[in-house]
Image (cartoon, rainbow, N blue to C red):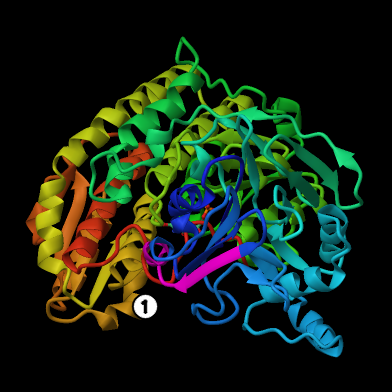
Amino acid sequence: MCGIVGYVGKRPAAELLLESLRKLEYRGYDSAGLAIHTGTGLTIAKEAGRIAVLSQLIDTQKHEGSVGIAHTRWATHGAPTRMNAHPHTDSSNTLALVHNGIIENYLTLKTWLLGQGISCVSDTDTEVVSQLAGLLWDGDMLSTMRKVISKLQGSFALAMLHEDKPDEIIVARKDSPLVIGVGLEEMFIASDITALLSQTRTFKLLEDNQIARVTSNSVEIFSSDGIPATVDPMVIDWNAEAAEKGGFDHFMLKEMMEQPKVVRDTIRPRIAGDKGSIVLDGLILDKTILQGMNKIFITACGTAYHAGMVAKYLFEHLAGIPVEVEFASEFRYRNPLVDSHTLVIVISQSGETADTLAALREAKRLGAHVLGIVNTVGSSIAREADDVIYTWAGPEIAVASTKAYIAQLSVIHLLAVHLATLRGTMEKQEIRQYLGELEKIPAKIDTILEQRHVVQQLAIRFAHGSDIFFIGRGFDYNIALEGSLKLKEISYIHSEAYAAGELKHGTIALIEEGTFVAALCTQSAMIDKMISNIKEVKARGAQVLGITCERFPQISQVADMTLYLPDTPDALVPILAVVPLQLFAYYCAIERGCDVDKPRNLAKSVTVE
Ligand code: AGP
């Protein structure tokens, strides 16, 4: 996690770095710092707390210069204190270094440094890198960095300044993202593109094991062996406003409100003119490859994993292909039964999640064809997968994923139809009908969002309870999991999602007078079963909110309160049903005074194990 930015040019660096750093606060926000080259030496400011605290500190100090690096931290090694904040230096303060990732062999290196008479002052893994750089300094940024990274195990994106090099930043990456923004007589570096969108649209995306020497006029890229490498510039068409709040109180609300557009943007260009098929440009995956496949394995983390669960039900139902879904953190260490006859699908908003990336690499090592469903263009997963389908959600800033999830579901529907077409399991007429209904989804999401104040009233009523249960069957269970995760992560209310039929095997013991249960009842074949499950929890004192479709009015006869979704075919309901749950979590968090966009202990992009 953690966010890195850097600038080398003619403008005053400090304010510019802070502005870019604020856009990376979603990557971590427990302490922050910067280092500026004044032309004659380095000045450093760092502090525990958010970037606003660093900004206040900078206002009271002099940090003049037009070359600098900065960092926002999500603590892994050592508490979020001033001492542990980046940048870190060597013992004689000749260089400053920021890091994102984890140095796995830092204890060995720390002991070795001690043997050389160098003791670290912080608890971090990063300081061993800056101390090592000081010890190995040979007067040249590139060769010093090469020597340093040859001793590191783990993941890193590094940026370093040295007092003897007033117009240079040296950067290096391995398993942590780093981009270089190209300007006119100025260059920028950052952990991701969104931090720099207000400065430039032209980027060079550093590959793993590459080092770059960045000056105001040049970007020289080398392999870790020092061999010059070419990285073509990439022009990004996301606009800067997409990464701003645009009048909403929180990014999360803005991003939920964008969902109709996100679905439209993701599906429209991919539905063929006659609506009878899907156009997924550039995919290697075709009928021949698919005929050789006997299984699909989906792997991802968190919300993206929940999207994978919906995919399992859909792919099996529409395309008749067996699907397994597994957390990437389990998949990577489990020796899964994957081979060249398996299609592995990895799903990730950021494209940088460490576990998902490692699962992708493991799948490739085992010979599988890997398809990535990714939101961030040019991210590691997008680059390493054999095939990529992008979700066109635009930058997602709030830690709680909403619009990226909806976009993932949209792609999954397209892919399900595509697989069904290739496998001949759906008739043309059926496909037309399905895609026609999919195209109506954005307007239906709009209808739900317009009624958000109804959800807000419910949230006000239940936000101060201690436990909330979400139950459902089939697709509704998948959505219950996502609704429960959303609530936990931003409102800190304890919550569980349960397959409704499983409740009576243990968890129903937790239901008592007044317990709040949200019951998802949207699947035609399951309505009667859900009515029985609602009755079971009500008999133990639960207050039940039924979430159902207009065509099931009978739910309001058993639930205490009922939210109705616009009617839509069963398989498409998950895209609608998740929206009130996202809104419920959001309004509960507001009611409890939580920091919605930056919940405690979390970071947007989990680039560490
Ligand atoms: C969702 O609200 C989360 N913050 C989290 O579960 C997230 O979905 C997960 O970390 C995976 O991230 P990715 O999609 O960027 O890989």
**373 w.r.t. 106: above or below:** above
Whether residue 425 is visible: no
Q: In this rendered view, identify the residue nearer to me: 376 or 538.
A: 376
**295 w.r.t. 270: above or below:** below
List the single residue furthest toward the front.
40
- The residue at the point 16 percent across, 40 percent down is 550
**131 w.r.t. 286: above or below:** below
User: Is 101 displayed left or right of 482 in the figure?
Assistant: right
Q: Residues within 10 Å of mark 1 (few under 14, many from 20)?
A: few
List the single residue furthest toward the top.
274
- The residue at the point 49 percent across, 77 percent down is 80
Q: Position of residue 344 (x, y in %)?
A: 67, 47
Whether residue 127 is visible: yes
Region of the chain picked out in magenta, as a range: 43-57
Q: Position of residue 529 (x, y in %)?
A: 27, 58
Q: In this rendered view, identify the residue nearer to me: 287 or 72.
A: 72
* The residue carrying mark 1 has its beta carbon less than 8 Å from ligand 1: no
User: Is 512 displayed left or right of 507 in the figure?
Assistant: left
Q: Is residue 203 magenta?
A: no
- The residue at the point 72 percent across, 49 percent down is 168
Under mark 1, the amino acid is His
**208 w.r.t. 571: above or below:** below
- SS state under label 1: helix
Q: Position of residue 281 (x, y in %)?
A: 62, 22
Q: Is residue 47 magenta?
A: yes
- Quarter holding the C terminus? bottom right
Residue indicated by mark 1: 505
- Quarter holding the N terminus? bottom right
